[in-house]
Image (cartoon, rainbow, N blue to C red):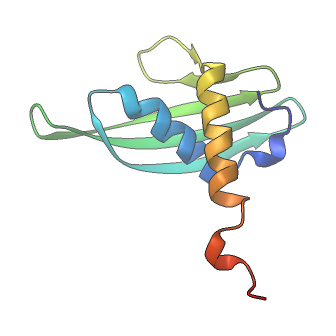
């Protein structure tokens, strides 16, 4: 679980949204992410998402919100009840984020 809010930034939010919408039947084209609020208790991000529906070749867009609390992450989507993100998914995204942004890549290591 996220005990440290410092890891949460636009890149983290984008990874989380990509993984969340992975199970969706639609193909996510792009996100537009804006941090709305931050305090000691929570961080709030608003996002606009564009979805391509392969069934009828239409593009849909909607706005949602992500609320990061110390003990949970809640996603708020239009016309859908608020969804608490599963801890398994959160751990997966945290590990992906650390691998991508915090671990040194072999080609970045200095040669001896």
Q: Which residue lies furthest to the front in this view?
A: 112
Q: In which quarter of the image is the C terminus?
A: bottom right
Using the image as rendered, state which of residue 105 and residue 34 is in the foreground.
105
How far from the left and from the top, in percent, is residue 71? 80, 20
Q: Which residue lies furthest to the bottom in this view?
A: 112
Q: Quadrant of the N terminus?
A: top right
Q: Residue at position x 72%, y 78% from top? A: 109
Q: Residue at position x 11%, y 40% from top? A: 57
- Compared to residue 10, the image places residue 84 above or below, namely above
- Residue 93 is left or right of residue 38, and the answer is left
How far from the left and from the top, in percent, is residue 94? 68, 40
- Residue 1 is left or right of residue 25, and the answer is right
- Residue 82 is left or right of residue 95, and the answer is left
Residue 26 picture quarter: top left
How far from the left and from the top, in percent, is residue 53? 19, 35
- Compared to residue 85, the image places residue 46 above or below, namely below
Using the image as rendered, state which of residue 76 and residue 97 is in the foreground.
97
- Compared to residue 35, the image places residue 39 above or below, namely above
Residue 110: tell me if it is visible.
yes
Q: Residue at position x 56%, y 38% from top? A: 16
How far from the left and from the top, in percent, is residue 18? 46, 40
- Residue 27 is left or right of residue 40, and the answer is left
Residue 10: tell me if it is visible.
no
Residue 48 picture quarter: top left
Residue 28 picture quarter: top left
Looking at the image, how many numbered discs can be counted on the residues? Answer: 0
Q: Which residue lies furthest to the top in this view?
A: 81
Using the image as rendered, state which of residue 104 and residue 45 is in the foreground.
104
């Amino acid at each position: 679980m996220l005990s440290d809010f410092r890891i949460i930034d636009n890149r983290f939010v984008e990874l989380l949204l990509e993984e969340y919408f992975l199970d969706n039947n639609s193909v996510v084209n792009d996100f537009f992410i804006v941090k709305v609020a931050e305090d000691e208790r929570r961080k709030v991000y608003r996002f606009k998402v564009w979805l391509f529906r392969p069934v009828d070749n239409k593009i849909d867009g909607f706005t949602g919100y992500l609320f990061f609390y110390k003990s949970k992450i809640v996603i708020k989507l239009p016309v859908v009840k608020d969804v608490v993100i599963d801890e398994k998914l959160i751990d997966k995204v945290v590990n992906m984020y650390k691998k991508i942004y915090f671990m040194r890549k072999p080609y970045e290591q200095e040669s001896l």
